[in-house]
Amino acid sequence: MHARREEELRTVPVAELAGYLTERSGLPGPRGNLELADGFAAVADRETILRFAHLDDEYLRFCGTEAVGRLVVAEPGNAPLGSLLRERASDPLWRVREASARALQLIGDAQPDRLREIVADWLTDADGYVRRAAVAGICEPRLLADPATATVALDACSSATDWIGSLPADRRTDPAVRNLRQALGYCWSVAVAPAPAAGLAAFDGLRAVDDSDIRWIVASNLTKARLRRVLETEEP
């Protein structure tokens, strides 16, 4: 399906590409066309990617931002591309913020070590949205077959959870912090699954923490089937 979509996109003249994507975007609606955005990220030329990443249109900006991940892979020394991705991680549009995380996953597909470096860097950011993109970006099942990336995913979940736990009550109502908490409500389950021994040890530590946000993170992950399967297998 992806190969067919990519081949289709290659036949669309650049001047018609914005209209083609917009018409098939799925917006307005609850779910944008992610497969189409993936296809764009795979085949679009550099100029079009960067142009779309700076447009006001939500879906085109989404497509361009995700595709920047491919440019980061192709141009490892281009610091402005990394800065653009980080900026988009805290974009006012939530779909664009999600595109930044998806761009990290494209980087992880090609250069796992580069993804790990970016995640470690972004987890030092004062903006909860940037931390959220780092956690959501690395907590992708297809990336965690790599043991080093799986380890960093667990570390990312721990770091982001500890950060929330360190914040005063008035900071925790910030939308960026709430968005990070929401991501941690499922990312722990993703990170634990490929590394159950280390993952459950880290996750069990959270269960003893007397903090309302951390209790919520624990409870949310316990509803996830992937974590329940690990618990059934690993716990006596």
Image (spheres, rainbow, N blue to C red):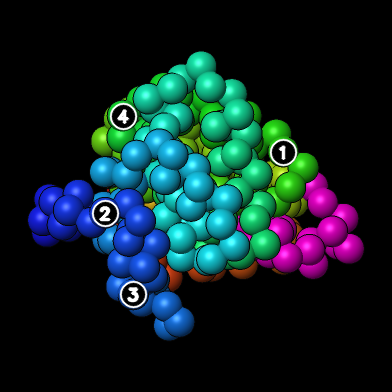
- The CA distance from mark 3 to mark 2 is 15 Å
Measuring 27% from the left and 61% from the top, which residue is drawn there?
35
**What's under tag 1, amino acid-wise?**
Asp
Q: Which of pointers 1 and 3 lies earlier in the amino acid sequence? A: 3
Residue 164 position in % (x across, y down): 72, 52
**What's under tag 4, amino acid-wise?**
Ala
The crowding category of the residue bearing disc 3, from other C-alpha atoms within 10 Å (few below 14, some 14 to 19, many at least 20), is few
Q: Are marks 1 and 3 in contact (CB under 8 Å)?
A: no
Q: Give the residues drawn in magenta, as a range.
A: 166-182
Q: Which of pointers 3 and 2 lies earlier in the amino acid sequence? A: 2
**Mark closer to the observer (1, 3):** 3
**Mark 3 = which residue?**
23
The image quadrant of residue 228 is bottom left
Tag 4 secondary structure:
helix
The crowding category of the residue bearing disc 4, from other C-alpha atoms within 10 Å (few below 14, some 14 to 19, many at least 20), is some
Magenta residue check for 61: no
Q: Which of pointers 1 and 2 lies earlier in the amino acid sequence? A: 2
Measuring 30% from the left and 73% from the top, which residue is drawn there?
24
The crowding category of the residue bearing disc 2, from other C-alpha atoms within 10 Å (few below 14, some 14 to 19, many at least 20), is few
Measuring 46% from the left and 60% from the top, which residue is drawn there?
60
**Mark 2 = which residue?**
13
Magenta residue check for 181: yes
Tag 1 secondary structure:
loop
Tag 2 secondary structure:
loop
Query: Up-down: is 173 above or below 119?
Result: below
**What's under tag 2, amino acid-wise?**
Pro
**Mark 1 = which residue?**
125
**Mark closer to the observer (4, 2):** 2
- The CA distance from mark 3 to mark 4 is 30 Å
